[in-house]
Amino acid sequence: MTDFMTITIEVSGRHVHLCQKDLDTLFGKGHSLSVYHPISQRGQFATVETVGVKIGKKVLKGVRIVGPVRDHSQVELSRSDALRLGIDTEVRLSGTIQGTPGATVLGPKGRIRLKEGVIIPHRHIHASPAAAKKAGVRNGSIVSVRVAGIRAVTFHRVIVRMHPTYRWHMHIDTDEGNAAGIRQRATGIVIKPLSYGKEAHKHQVA
């Protein structure tokens, strides 16, 4: 690859993914998610519907759902959100929820109890095979991404996730965005791959 390549960085706020069974419990049988606005990855969208996330006696209200429905339900929070709820969960790639804390998700028609599935999302890059080839990376590559500006920062240990439908974007959480002075999106520079690490291999999802 070239020594660097630019990428759009997006800040992803707290959100929930739901399977259809859990969606039915929360919003009524056969409920279909309503699009609030599309997000950068093809076919994905923020929904009109929101839920509450409850752990112990503490509740985060108005948590957006990201559609479409998934095979498994999970909750993605920032570290600040997790501390607010009084839990110490792990940084994981989306979908790797085994052994993570659970939560109660509250909807207008019911509630569900997740035995596990609350994570802090690992900073990551979405890449199509063509974009990955151009950048000289592959699924599971670990790179660094540099952001300029008054609060310039370099994000290390950014994991590449590859799929034919993916667009070349990087996702960080709100804590990371605040640290870099990024409100919604910015442009970063991808520094050549550091490795195809054990951590990436452990957490990648087929």
Image (cartoon, rainbow, N blue to C red):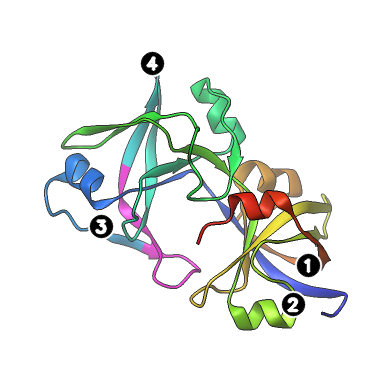
Residue 86 image point, x, y percent: 52, 20
Specify which label sits upstream in the sequence, 4 or 2. 4
What residue does disc 1 label?
Answer: 190
Residue sitting nearer the eye, 131 or 151: 131
Kindly identify which numbered label has been placed on residue 135. 2
Residue sitting nearer the eye, 203 or 37: 203
Kindly identify which numbered label has been placed on residue 33. 3
Q: CA distance from mark 1 to mark 4?
A: 42 Å
Q: Is residue 48 visible in the rendered structure shown here?
A: yes
Task: Bin the neighbour count of mark 1 within 10 Å (Cα to Cα): few under 14, some 14-19, many 20 and up.
Answer: many
Q: What residue do we see at 74% from left, 77% from top?
A: 135
What residue does disc 4 label?
Answer: 57
Q: CA distance from mark 3 to mark 4?
A: 28 Å
Residue range in magenta is 37-50
Residue 193 image point, x, y percent: 81, 65
What amino acid is labelled 4 in the image? Lys
Specify which label sits upstream in the sequence, 1 or 4. 4
